[in-house]
Image (spheres, helix red, strand yellow):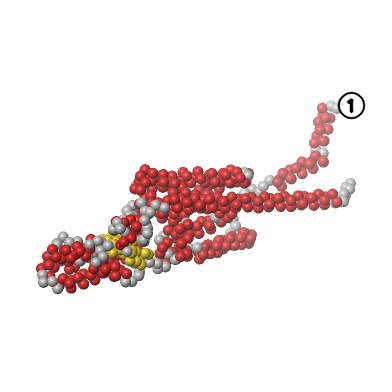
Amino acid sequence: MSFSPSQRYSSTSMMDHSPTSTIFETSSISEHTKSRPPPPQRASAGFFDAAIASARATYFKMAGAGVAIIALVIFGVLPLFWGAVYAKPKPITGWVVDFDRSSVGSFVSTALESSPISTIRWEIVSASLFPGGPSELAQAIKDEKAWVAISINPNATFNLQAAVTSADSLYNGSLAITAYAAEARQETAFRSFIRPNLQATLPAIAQAFARSHAQQLSALSNSSALIAAVPQLATTPISYTIHNLIPFDIPVATAVTFVGLIYLLILAFFLLNIAFQARVISGIEHTLSTASLLKVRITTAFVQYLFLSLFYTLLSRAFQLDFSRSFGAGGFPLLWMVNFCGMLALGLALESMLTLLTTRFVGFFLLPWVVVNVSSAVLPVEVEYNLYRYAYAMPFYNISKAVRTIVFGTKNELGLNFGILLAWTVLSLVTMSIFQLHIRHRSHSAALAAYEKELLSEGEEVEQATTKPIVSQV
């Protein structure tokens, strides 16, 4: 049976416009329209509109909680620093050594021993402990066996009596007493405690001796002529000299012994966030195995800190910080390694806590970490309360000590300083691994629980569908 072209067209047109076809097309268009997302709208809500009441409540809750947590940090952590600089410092130890063993030495030793204890507690130390004389005493101060020492120099009494006998106009009373201290050991201690105490105590003792000695001179038959010829025998028969054994004579060193350490910690914090964002954006944060992720995190931190500590050390060199005083050409790489180990000790602690606290809350660890470190380096531990003896184990304290040894030549304890910094590094690596394992286990357990819940939900839906009665339709 054949159809003409017009009949075929008519048949096709009737099929295309059948009720079933029309309903199908209408349904498809309707579904497509429903699935199309609405056009973007301009943000037009006011803060107090009823439509965003829930969002507003969430905002207030989070902002208020943040203020409450920071308030706890203010009263729970910051007092550690305030306390370090608020309390009256405990007196530091000072030695008095009488190499004169005569009237001048006896007078000065007795006066110092009985002087009121303020910032220095004076102890009389036998001269027999220093057979090498004042030079050996000076070396003991360099070795940090005491903060300050006063030497009543050998023959101080003999030289004074000889000057009186011969009317020596070249007599210099300041050679009688020498005070030894090392400013670079801790410049704040030297400038705030040691030097002011010496400048107040020693002139008073010298004046008291001058009054006593003037009475002795007045008993001489030629006292008037003697005083006229050598007036210093009456006015300053003894005086003193302060010998700063290791001066803090490079002002830019403050950047690497204290203030710059805060910047070192901040740089480590920036690197921490950069590395974390790189892992998240690249996807490896969630796709790598736990062992591989830990290797990536640790290797990245070591490489980043190695180069950043080099740039940090080069910055100090650009500002003419001399590294060669104590170790020659080896001073620069040695200081580089101090800064590198310091960044490891400071930065890996943050890296470890990031695993546990996430980027949202790691800042609440950063502030206490800064405070406990800064409080350990602002003043000598010896003048602080016993609470602050924790400073000996802090990265800031040990970095500062190591830098002073390299730059100024203070007591060499580099082995101890490096050991403490590396101990912090190992501790952070261990805690990071533990925290990472814990977080991965918790995340995997949560994912399994969600998967099982979804399977259970789908099973219930299938069961409901199979038990639902079938309704015939005509």
Pick the front one: 348 or 456:
348
Q: Is the residue marked by circle 1 packed among few (<14), some (14-19), or many (20+) residues within 10 Å?
A: few
Of residues 253 and 408, the one nearer the viewer is 408
Q: Nearer the viewer, residue 416 or 183?
A: 416
Asked which quadrant contains residue 93, the reply is bottom left
Q: Is residue 82 above or below residue 473?
A: below
* Position of 297 relative to 99 (above/below): above
How far across and how far down the image is residue 136, in percent?
31, 56
The answer to whether residue 295 of the structure is visible from this angle is: yes
Residue beneath the point at 41% across and 54% down: 401
| Residue 355 spot, x, y in % from top left | 58, 52
Which quarter of the figure is the N terminus placed in?
top right
Q: Secondary structure at mark 1?
A: loop
Where residue 17 appears, as percent x and y from the top left, is 80, 38
Q: Position of residue 117 (x, y in %)?
A: 35, 70
Residue type indicated by callout 1: Met
Task: Determine whether, in the image, residue 41 is placed left or right of residue 201.
Answer: right
Above or below residue 331? Residue 370 is below
Q: Left or right of 410: which side holds 5?
A: right
Q: Give the labeled residue for mark 1.
A: 1
Q: Residue at x 56, y 63 (%)?
A: 64
